[in-house]
Image (cartoon, helix red, strand yellow):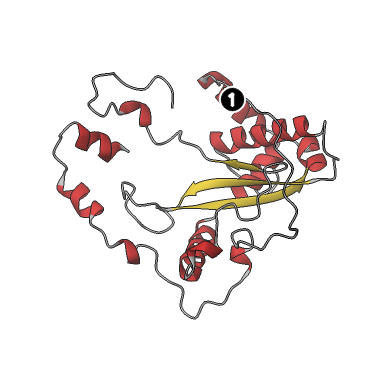
Amino acid sequence: IRLLSKACRDEAFTQEEISTMNLERKTIVPFLKNYELGPELDHQLVKPPSTTESPPAPAKASWAFFSFSPQALSELKEKATQTLDSNTKFISTDDALTAFIWQSISRARLARLDDSTSTQICRAVDVRTQMDAPKNYPGMLQNMTYKVSTLSQITHESLGVVASWLRSELGRDQLRRRTQALITYQHNKGGTSATADANPSTDIMLSSWAKLGCWENDFGFGLGKPESV
């Protein structure tokens, strides 16, 4: 997005940017040798529908925006940090906010779902660091993490414990292997999907744009910078 904005303003690219944009995309993620399908792709394999019946019509929905001030985000992270599980030494603000969103939506869903209902969060992750790719590599280089629980457990656990679960899915080696497995297995791209087993009625698909700095780009339109991203 930043490079597109730069091009729209007719600004010259640096040599580093040009080199990065011309990296061979087919080898940016190394294939796994002799890979056999394993649990790495359990959540990303498209399965045939279990029934031929048409799904029920979705309920009427509306857009809603929630704004968190920097102070509120800081307090949210501080609260979560007080109740981390024993194996977690650090969580990010995004971990705390994502846990808060998952818990809040799960509480709302208890009005129509049994508390034993399974719920899954699918979280988009930038894997440039895990794949040793430049941070400004312009290609689509992301994967997803997945965590499954029940509505009862999510709503009754502390914020810190739920945030700890999310952080535990971000291990470098784990994400690297899962990404390599996905690329290695994608001989038929129609057979995989980032949200292959996600159920919109019970699950959450979430991504964060907090670190992309999109509010700094104006694309040379003369309209100024974005008010909201």
Q: Which residue is at a point 81% across and 45% down the rendered structure image?
A: 117
Q: Quadrant of the C terminus?
A: top left
Numbered-mark total: 1
Instruction: Give the camera-side residue of 46 and 124.
Output: 46
Secondary element under disc 1, as helix, strand or loop, is loop
Query: Would residue 171 be found to the left or right of residue 102 on screen?
Result: left
Residue pointed to by mark 1: 63
- Above or below 57: residue 174: below
Which quadrant holds the N terminus?
A: top left
For this view, does 10 lie left or right of residue 110? left
Question: Residue 44, image x and y in percent?
Answer: 59, 59
Find residue 147 and report its horizontal and vertical position in percent: 67, 50
Residue at position x 54%, y 38% from top?
A: 92
Of the pair 52 and 184, the residue shown nearer to us: 52
Q: Position of residue 224 (x, y in %)?
A: 29, 19
The amino acid beneath tag 1 is Trp
Judge by depth and name the residue closer to the eye, 171 or 104.
104
Residue 169, visible in the rendered structure:
no
Q: Residue at x 70, y 44 (%)?
A: 85
Residue 87 versus residue 64 in the image, above or below: below
Residue at 32%, 48% (x, y): give it.
138
Quarter where residue 112 is shown? top right
Q: Is residue 61 something one can see in this rendering?
A: yes
Label 1 crowd bin: few (<14), some (14–19), many (20+), radius 10 Å: few
